[in-house]
Image (cartoon, rainbow, N blue to C red):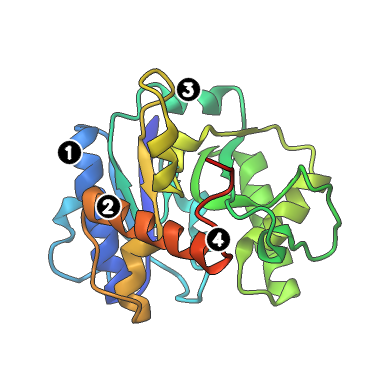
Amino acid sequence: MRDGVIFVATGQGYLELAMQAAESLRATNPGLPVDLFTDLPDAPGLDLFDEVHATQDSHMRAKLDCFARARFERVLYLDCDVLVLASLGDLFALADRFALSLAHDMRRCSPLIRQGHAVTTPYAFPQLNSGVMLYRNDIAMAAFFAEWKQRYVEAGIARDQVTLKDLLWVSDLRFYVLPPEFNLRRVTELDAWEPLDAIPTILHSHRLLQHLRGQGARVTTFEVLRELEREALEAEWASLGSEGPWPR
């Protein structure tokens, strides 16, 4: 099959998030095939997905084992903590020209996002976020994913973006950096957008899984998440003795 979306969910909490994300995708992109990889393939309610595949391993980054198993030629992988807010449009066409498309990670001044394992990269080459990835599902990408998995295991670092950054720096893979509306990690950015700037399309926020981490009530809507981020932004600047990054 030509185009499709995959989710990978291990554990009941992430499975419920994947179902929520898939519902938002169905509402905004009707007719687009959506598959699930999970360690709970017999759980109720999975008829929301076109096909359900059992994961071969339930480790923390089981997604690394599932990318090449997708049945689509052009694949959009989404983390479970997303809401799809608009039509994806012609996004899949990128896979005809680029083997992989993904967005920069946020908080690029922090050591967490600067971290590499075996490779040192310039500041302008930070980690890229692996929670939204469009890729061409072919032999070359299967080899890339296999090497990423090997580097991840050998490094012994929980965050897969660390070894992904290393591999992208040394690889000859042709990849593209998505604009932020396709992996919107900071909703407060929208407060500065003008009408013709962009259409927020894929919202990807850790606040959608904060209830799984004991950090607050479950968040299910864009509106609630936006208010939480505005409050958090004000609090973070206030903790530094400032109202914001620039004089007003």
Q: How far apart are the alpha carbons under marks 2 and 4? A: 20 Å
First of labels 4, 1 by sequence position: 1
Q: Are marks 4 and 1 in contact (CB under 8 Å)?
A: no
Q: Residue furthest bottom?
A: 214
Q: Which mark is residue 93?
A: 3
Give percent across and percent down for residue 62.
49, 67
Q: Do the residues bearing badges 3 and 4 touch, measured as CB atoms within 8 Å? A: no
Check disc 1 and report the residue beneath it. Answer: 27
Q: Nearer the viewer, residue 1 or 102?
A: 102
**Residue named by callout 2:** 21
Mark 2–mark 1 distance (CA, rounded to whole Å): 10 Å
The answer to which quarter of the image holds residue 235 is bottom left
Q: Residues within 10 Å of mark 2 (few under 14, many from 20)?
A: many
**Which residue is labeled 4 in the image?**
64
Q: Residue at x 24, y 73 (%)?
A: 217
Q: Residues within 10 Å of mark 4 (few under 14, many from 20)?
A: some
Q: Position of residue 198 (x, y in %)?
A: 41, 25
Q: Secondary structure at mark 2?
A: helix
Mark 4 lies on a secondary structure that is helix
